[in-house]
Amino acid sequence: MSYRVAIVGATGAVGQELLQILEQRQFPISELRLFASERSVGKTLLFRGEAIPVHALRPDSFKGVDFAFFSAGASRSKEFAPIAVQSGAAVIDNSSAFRMEPNVPLVIPEINPDALRHHAGIIANPNCSTIIMLMALEPLRRLARIRRIVVSTYQAASGAGAQAMQELLESTRAYLQGEPFQPRVLPHPYAFNLFSHNSPIGEDGYNEEERKMIVETRKIWGDPEVAVSPTCIRVPVLRAHSESLVVELETRPPLEAIYTAYQRFPGVQLVDDRPHNHFPMPIEATGRDEVLVGRIRYDLGTPDGVALFACGDQLRKGAALNAVQIAEHLIGRAPTP
């Protein structure tokens, strides 16, 4: 059986990654419709050797569509996702629009695929930082309950979209040539710099990205008591986010059991070579489906703590791949380990 598929935000960084992953994983598609903003109308994108035209999004765009992947921002999702559902499509939304709605599953297929049984037309893709963190922690959580997470993120330009990636390239080139550069996409100089994640700060001092990691973790794990203390930082890396994690467990397993759990968990690649000081790096995570995990060690600061480091491609497992895996589950295909 094949399906009619729509991608909203097809010309963006995640949209283009969706096209690649749908082709690479041979998702059964009989018709593909691509949508983007008015300025992209008339462009074509290549899929399976065919040039597919990009159209403007309209209320009748989803007639006959089986799956609609949304990656065009929360406002577009709120406006058009309900219309797509009314037209009969299953919506997999990559924005924050519906993540915390009680009747919308928030799904990482390796972790909580059972939540898909209860969807009412819309399934939410978690935030990229949350996906990478929970993939890195799930093997450990299956050995012992995690009481607290302290996480510092090192987030790549890809998280802010294709224009931010281009700004990093241009600002780096200008810096090396000794030329002035005025940021247009991000609020601070990006080349050879890092800064607090560029999302609004709340009254509690946490920014929007950090709050997403807190509330999404509790929903995905079904654990409202887990404590999450995030600090999110933008770093001058093109793509692949990195995260430093320290967790407090109810009981701390032997290190051998922890290593074995990571070696066996689908979607995670253990990179932990102490003799050669080789651990996860964003340059090695880029283009990979797996989340790389290493630097695993007992935390000396707490009796039941474990520390580790993780890297994951923000555009793949952090966004597009996770969305396609959700669709694969919906059609009865388990995600490829």
Image (spheres, rainbow, N blue to C red):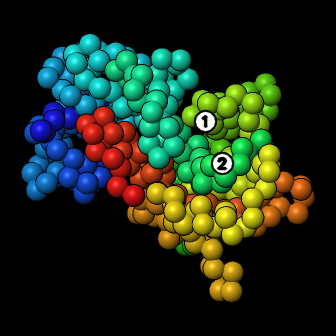
Numbered badge on residue 141 = 2
Q: Residue furthest bottom?
A: 275
Total count of labels: 2
Circle 1: element type: helix
The answer to which quarter of the image holds residue 273 is bottom right
Circle 2: element type: helix
Is there CB contact under 8 Å for labels 2 and 1? yes
* x and y percentages locating residue 297 in the rendered image: 76, 67
When the figure is inspected, residue 235 is found, relative to residue 6, above or below; the finding is below
Numbered badge on residue 110 = none
Q: How far is the residue under mark 2 from the one under mark 1? A: 10 Å
Horizontally, is 235 left or right of 35 in the view? right
Horizontally, is 95 left or right of 259 in the view? left
The answer to which quarter of the image holds residue 49 is bottom left
Q: Quadrant of the N terminus?
A: top left
* x and y percentages locating residue 156 in the rendered image: 55, 55
* x and y percentages locating residue 315 in the rendered image: 43, 51
Q: Residues within 10 Å of mark 2 (few under 14, many from 20)?
A: some
Horizontally, is 44 left or right of 244 in the view? left
Mark 2 is on which residue type? Arg
Report the residue at 38% width, 35% height from top.
71
Report the residue at 16% width, 35% height from top.
3
Report the residue at 26% width, 13% height from top.
86
Q: Of residues 187 and 56, which is closer to you in this image? A: 56
**Residue 140 visible to the viewer:** yes
**Residue 200 visible to the viewer:** no
Which residue has dot 1 on it? 221
Q: Of residues 327 and 40, which is closer to you in this image? A: 327
Horizontally, is 171 left or right of 137 in the view? left
First along the sequence among labels 2 and 1: 2
Q: Quadrant of the C terminus?
A: bottom left
